[in-house]
Image (spheres, coloured by chain):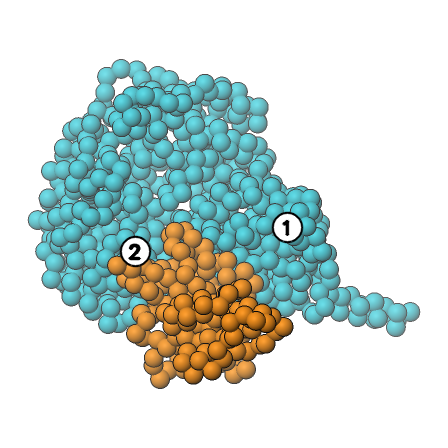
Amino acid sequence: MKTTYTISIFTTNTVGLLNRITIVFTRRRLNIESLTVSETERKGVSRFTIVIKSESREFVEKLVRQIRKITDVLAVFGYLDNEIVFNEIALFKLASPSGGKPIDAKAINLDWNAKVVHFGMDYVVVEKNGTEEEIGEFYQYLKQWDILEYIKSGRVAVGKTEKGLVEYLPEGNWEIV
Amino acid sequence: MGQAQSSTSEIEKNRFLTGAQAIMQSLVEQGVHTIFGYPGGAIMPTYDALYDYQDQLKHILVRHEQGAGHAAQGFARMTNKAGVCMVTSGPGATNLITPIADAMLDSTPMVCIVGQVKGNLLGTDAFQECDVIGMTMPITKWNYQVVDPNEIPDVIAKAFYIAESGRPGPVLIDITRTAQTDVMTVPFSYEKCNSIISYRPRVEPKKEHLQAAADLINAAKKPYILAGHGVLISGGEEELKAFVEKSGAPVATTLLGMSAMDADHPLFVGWPGMHGNYGANVLTNSCDVLIAIGMRFDDRITGDLNTYAKQAKVVHIEIDPSEIDKNVKADAPIVGDAKATLRALLPLIEQKDRSEWRKEFEKYDQEEYEKINKKELFHEGNQIKMGEAVNMLSEKTKGEAVVVTDVGQHQMITNRYYRFKKANSIVTSGGAGTMGFALPAAFGAKVAVPEREVVAVIGDGGFQMTLQELGTIAQSGLPVKIIILNNNFLGMVRQWQELFFDNRYSFVELQNPDFITIAKGFGIAGHTVKDRAELSNSLDTLLNSDKPYLLEIVCEKEENVFPMVPAGGCVTNVRLD
């Protein structure tokens, strides 16, 4: 049984770091399910959120230590799903030609907690936030219309602790952005 | 007139350095005095700056960039300071790949300064451009591309700090030609680096971890110490000796940890691993506490992990946290520098006599001696066996030489028969197993410690991989002593083909050149010995030479190295013949 792990990596903001990190996964023939990189509230600190699936907790622990070894990496954590609050965002472009089946904006909004964010000439763009499962169910619902494009982001996640980012980082003067 | 003069000196004073000059000045201020290198287009501005720094920086021109890398490694292994090499872009850089990978696996500090095409040509497939940063990312501890000369002092300072601290390793700095030729826009100032926020190796161990380890060790009836390269890197031989003697525990050293213990110390039991000693392997599975110090449980040591030391509690002292639990699960892990940790652990250890346990090794030693050593040292006939050659070398140098080996049968034989009496005396390619390592590495070692006898022991196969460095050795005039143990085979591969591939010798026999003529062509004297009766005199000639010298020892052709734990086998499953 494969378990989903979310790896949060805090790094200094340097060129080439993405490559350095993905090499650790490649060498171990580990597939990355999703990857998100963003800035944080502290100046010069980037945050990678990488989702993987693995059968072995020990394997993930070793992976985390190998990532920590990279010189520009400040801290690394491996989380199980119940240890984090996480979400993804999906955009759906649906065909809405005149005379076609009308888009049910109300149901999308109230039943599915999603929203139409753009009305084009013959199409609409719908945005949905949620877990992978929620987005998957929503996708099934939307299939009654013609889905022109579908895109989903990688996971973003924060740990379920009262700690702030600075408490994860090595002691230093971490200026807030 | 007076005014004109003062304004000139004012200009002189405020003249900012070019990037190339900044590289030179940074190296000088870092305390570097030797560079192994090879010039070429993209590094030429720095070589031009070097012209003015010749009295402060000794540059040694090698014959191939791989030679520069291995020489820097040999230098580093002797000094525990980063070996420095400098090469050009493209093929210059790619020729360094093997030494860099080797240094990464064997924790050897090295700083590689590599030229790169002009900044505006980056990514255009320019002449001699290659993505050296991308290529070396997985095999360097850190690498960085410099495009702005102002960055140079800080980047070089950081490079040396990363290379030399924690678990040492290679660092590569890729510097564009424009970053070398452009003038800095700020005054040059160099400050040695001693901390990086994202990189904080732990030297001093945590107290609570020490006590847990000490409790295990004190309660042990049969503790067994495996000492690795980390002991030598940290300079912790004295601490190891004190620890061994107080605990009364038998100690083996890994291939790279060899010489961390005096080979004649009563508690020294040899080395574990594929071609290590019989008892040192077998009793791994009898000890109750295994104390690993500055080593990483390489598969050539452990064999099959599922049957390795399962009965033992494991104390693992290691500076690289990613090595803890990587191969062997530790019951009492301690992250820290080997020397600092041993020093801190010593007062917590009880003085014990464990000579009964030490005695258990003796019957294995006896059997190994009867079945292997005796045959190799006291045989009939005129042909020379590798073991007796190394044994004689060990006696003649009183175990005090720096021994540099290549990779293969002769490497294993050298570590079996050379009895190291002095710390930090083995230079060998362990993790990577790089053939061609020994000749340039021996040269680098000799440059670092010219006062010590440096002997390279090389096979006939490996010698032909980097023999062009005979030119470098000849030009330097340094008396590097070179021994070729020539069996006309790629011996280790042949041995495997004999034992595991049904005697199917697939491309392992060599038609060798006349090595002595080759050496003479480079201006290096040498001779060949084939007859056992002349071996002693031949070694004397080699050792007495005050110039570089090559001794070709023609050995028995199809000799096998034993003991042997077959790859992936259990450490108790040792073949003695």
Left or right: B358 with respect to A96?
Answer: left
Q: Are marks 1 and 2 on the same chain?
A: yes
Chain containing mark 1: B
Residue at x-position 38% and y-position 26%: B490
Tell me residue B553's x, y (percent): 39, 23
Left or right: B39 with respect to B530?
Answer: right
- Chain in orange colour: A
Assign a secondary structure to mark 2: loop
Tell me residue A85's x, y (percent): 37, 77
**Residue B83: which numbered mark, if any?**
none
What residue sits right under mark 2 in the picture? Answer: B326
Task: List the single residue furthest toward the front.
Answer: A99
What residue sits right under mark 1 in the picture? Answer: B115
Colour chain B appears in? cyan
Picture quadrant of residue B522: top right
Which amino acid is tagged 2? Lys
Residue at x-position 40% and y-position 48%: B106
* The C terminus of chain B - image quarter: top left
Left or right: B240 with respect to B109?
Answer: left
Task: List the single residue furthest toward the left.
Answer: B356
* The N terminus of chain B - image quarter: bottom right
Which amino acid is tagged 1? Gly
Task: List the single residue furthest toward the right.
Answer: B1
Tell me residue A177's x, y (percent): 54, 82
> As displayed, is residue B204 above or below residue B76?
below
Considering depth in this image, is A171 or B413 the residue closer to the camera? A171
Labels 1 and 2 touching (C-beta < 8 A): no
Work out how far the residue at label 1 is from the one at label 2, CA to CA, in angstroms: 36 Å
